[in-house]
Amino acid sequence: MCLIAFALDAHPDYSLILAANRDEFYNRPTAYAGAWDGAPEVIGGRDLKGGGTWLGMTRSGRVAAVTNFRDPQQINEEAKTRGHLTKDYLTQVELPVEDYLAQVQREAALYNGFNLLLFEQGKGFHFSNYEGRINRLPAGVHGLSNALLNTPWPKLQRLKQSFTDAIRMEVSHDRLLALLEDSELAPDEQLPDTGIGNQWEKAISSICIKTEDYGTCCSTVLTIDRQGQAQFTERSFPVGTREDKIVRFTFDTSEVATQ
């Protein structure tokens, strides 16, 4: 997962609204979002190579997302798969979020650079092993790409603004999915320098990335309203072995949470 905008406790009707794109090499095998075998309480896509997920949620309302921190000079081929950071949180529902984050903090050096977002019962947290600090998130609209939270890269600023404008109207999953299809490239003078060269910085500077073998594979929108009603929508793009496909899930997190 490489680009996320979310509103935490920032809308009169919703405790969480999240819109995200997953960018990956097209040939990396993945499964469409759905209930997981062996953990049917979890809804999300699966990375069939690493075994984790980039974004998922439980029927009780836990949400987890991870992005890579872009630093090509600091890649350890033996590092643990970052998708397990989200998978473990979603499947260890008995472990409080604060305790889980303390565990991640202790083991952070075992992973290549990452950003982890965790949500539960109206609370949100961010942790990056490039920062090393557990951050309780304030209410508001936030954004995350492949740098620290709210780093003002052009595509993140563009998405945060369009996302903010969109949720001022009636919240619509289809409208938010449409925002995530924006393929406009950033001007050269606004490109960050992350060590991958200007040509590649340009190619991946749009909200929706389209290159020959790498780009946006799917978009996800999820919402949890203040009565606990959750909706999860994934739109896959026809790249690699994936088809142009939309899957939708609706459930009541308050029923599960009180069982």
Image (cartoon, rainbow, N blue to C red):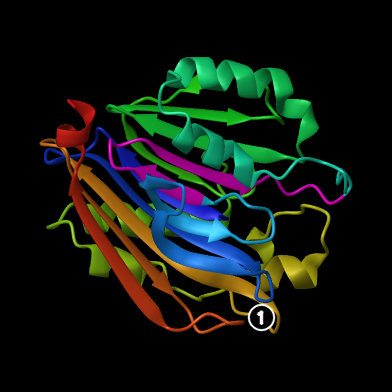
Q: Quadrant of residue 190?
A: bottom right
259 with respect to 116 (left or right): left
Q: Position of residue 186 (x, y in %)?
A: 58, 68
Quadrant where the C terminus is found in the figure: top left
Quadrant where the N terminus is found in the figure: bottom right
**Residue 51, above or below 225:** below
Q: Quadrant of residue 50?
A: bottom right
Task: Please state which of residues 107 and 194 is positioned toward the viewer in this rendering.
Answer: 107
Residue located at (61% from left, 72% from top): 215
Residue located at (72% from left, 65% from top): 201
Secondary structure under the numbered disc 1 in the rendered image = loop
From this viewpoint, is residue 125 visible?
A: yes
Residue located at (45% from left, 22% from top): 97
82 with respect to 154 (left or right): right
143 with respect to 185 (left or right): left
Provide the residue span drawn in magenta.
Answer: 55-72
Residue topped by disc 1: 211
Residue located at (54% from left, 71% from top): 217
Specify whether residue 70 is painted magenta. yes
Q: Position of residue 83 (x, y in %)?
A: 62, 46
**Residue 17, above or below 140:** below
Residue lying at the far front of the rendered structure: 38
**Residue 112, above or below 18:** above
Crowd rating for badge 1 (residues with CA inside 10 Å; few <14, some 14–19, many 20+): few
Task: Please state which of residues 13 and 258 is positioned toward the viewer in this rendering.
Answer: 258
